[in-house]
């Protein structure tokens, strides 16, 4: 069992010179707006922690109520990359929804991080200017939506956080009710002792570069190109694209109909995977729904590791919503991160066509992990 102390930041002692700023479970519980505060997440990977509300169907969250999540102190010096909210609306609250799927009593979630250095709460900002408030779709208990609030560093800045809060900002006390199933936080690895391997397929795509203070990713395709991902790798493609796609994924990679397989570097520990991706379709004619030559997709992303002598895939990105353009990141569990010869990374698109514009893998020497 991996303990928190085994992945402590090098700046741990420096951080606690300023510990007066740190939010605790007790401090949040004193605020009347919080229904519950969680402070014992699962350390899923070197860069990911996960909170589960272990109630069947998720935890009910009514309008103007909050749930708090305390981040372990060993992660306070890490920069937050993404937050994944797992939520839905139960059918018993789905009243008066019309044929256009409009919900007059929508349940909406506002996700905020507490920046311990600046002593303030900051909300997510969508890189494309869309509303940061997340709508809870009517779904069954076994199918909550995984809302990826991505690229915090690009729009909000370098956030070092000690807590997260989720607030229901719906306007109806009776029916604006969401079911919160959990929350996942993805951090950047430290700059030191991390090596990267990347491949770009769609020209104009690049990843965040913390070392050179380049805090915004760029995409060779997406909504700004009306669904043209020139040179990208297509997964789960159902028709013929109206532009040129790439058929050869490069050395040590195999392209199949629904997935991309990448050979991993033996003897290293895989600590983060980043995929620049989109799921929109470019059309010949104007789409009456978008007034542009684009159809927005509904694809889901799955990413995992397949060991050489096993048919099983250890998924660590599961059913993530794919945006028109964005970077989805994740990492394997600590006890599954050590790479042996013949291990492969599996990138799979489901439900709709998926376009990979590039990928980047981060490795660390396993000797740095006391448990490995």
Image: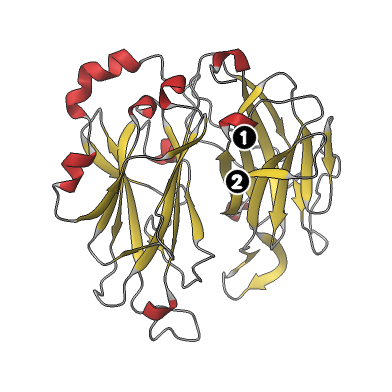
Apparent side of residue 222 relative to residue 67 in the rendered image (left or right): right
Residue 365 in sight from this viewpoint: no
Q: Where is residue 304 drawn, in percent x and y?
A: 68, 42
Q: Is residue 233 visible?
A: yes
Mark closest to the chain's N terminus, 2 or 1:
1
Q: Please, what secondary structure does the residue beneath circle 1 have?
A: strand
Q: Quadrant of residue 178?
A: bottom left
Q: Is residue 5 above or below residue 175?
A: above
The dot on residue 317 is 2
**Which residue bears the numbered disc 1?**
273
- Image mark count: 2
Q: Quadrant of residue 293?
A: bottom right
**Residue at 34% in and 36% down:** 71
Q: Along the horizontal axis of the image, is 116 left or right of 310?
A: left
User: Which residue is found at the position 61% from the left and 63% from the top?
Assistant: 296
SS label for mark 2: strand
The residue nearer to you, when weighing 178 against 336, is: 336
Q: Residue at x 47, y 51 (%)?
A: 128
Q: Looking at the rendering, which quadrant does residue 323 occupy?
A: bottom right
Q: Residue at x 43, y 83 (%)?
A: 97
- Residues marked 2 and 1 touching at CB (< 8 Å): yes
Instruction: Give 105 or 221, whichever is nearer the viewer.
Output: 105
Q: Nearer the viewer, residue 27 or 350?
A: 27
């Amino acid at each position: 069992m991996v303990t928190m102390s085994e992945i402590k930041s090098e700046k741990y002692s420096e951080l606690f010179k300023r510990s007066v700023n740190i939010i605790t479970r007790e401090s949040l519980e004193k605020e009347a707006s919080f229904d519950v505060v969680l402070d014992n997440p699962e350390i899923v990977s070197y860069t990911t922690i996960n909170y589960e509300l272990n109630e069947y169907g998720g935890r009910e969250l009514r309008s103007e109520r909050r749930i708090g999540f305390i981040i372990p102190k060993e992660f306070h010096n890490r920069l937050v990359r993404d937050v994944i909210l797992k939520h839905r609306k139960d059918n018993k609250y789905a009243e008066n929804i019309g044929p256009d799927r409009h919900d007059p009593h929508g349940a909406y979630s506002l996700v905020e991080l507490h920046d311990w250095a600046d002593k303030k709460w900051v909300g997510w900002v969508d890189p494309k200017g869309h509303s940061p408030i997340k709508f809870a779709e009517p779904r069954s208990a076994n199918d909550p939506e995984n809302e990826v609030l991505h690229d915090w560093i690009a729009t909000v800045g370098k956030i070092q956080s000690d807590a997260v809060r989720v607030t229901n900002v719906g306007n109806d006390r009776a029916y604006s009710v969401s079911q919160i199933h959990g929350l996942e936080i993805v951090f950047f690895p430290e700059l030191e002792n991390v090596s990267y391997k990347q491949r770009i397929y769609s020209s104009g795509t690049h990843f965040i570069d913390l070392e050179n203070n380049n805090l915004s990713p760029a995409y060779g395709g997406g909504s700004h190109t009306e669904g043209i991902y020139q040179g990208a790798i297509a997964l789960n493609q159902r028709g013929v694209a109206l532009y040129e796609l790439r058929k050869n994924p490069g050395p040590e990679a195999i392209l199949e109909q629904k997935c991309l397989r990448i050979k991993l570097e033996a003897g290293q520990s895989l600590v983060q995977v980043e995929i620049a991706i989109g799921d929109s379709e470019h059309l010949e004619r104007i789409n009456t729904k978008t007034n542009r030559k684009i159809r927005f997709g509904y694809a889901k992303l799955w990413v995992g590791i397949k060991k050489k002598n096993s048919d099983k895939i250890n998924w660590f990105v599961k059913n993530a919503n794919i945006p028109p353009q964005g970077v989805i990141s994740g990492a394997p569990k600590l006890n599954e991160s050590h790479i042996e010869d013949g291990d492969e990374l599996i990138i799979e698109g489901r439900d709709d066509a998926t376009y990979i514009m590039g990928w980047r893998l981060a490795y660390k020497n396993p000797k740095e992990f006391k448990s490995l």
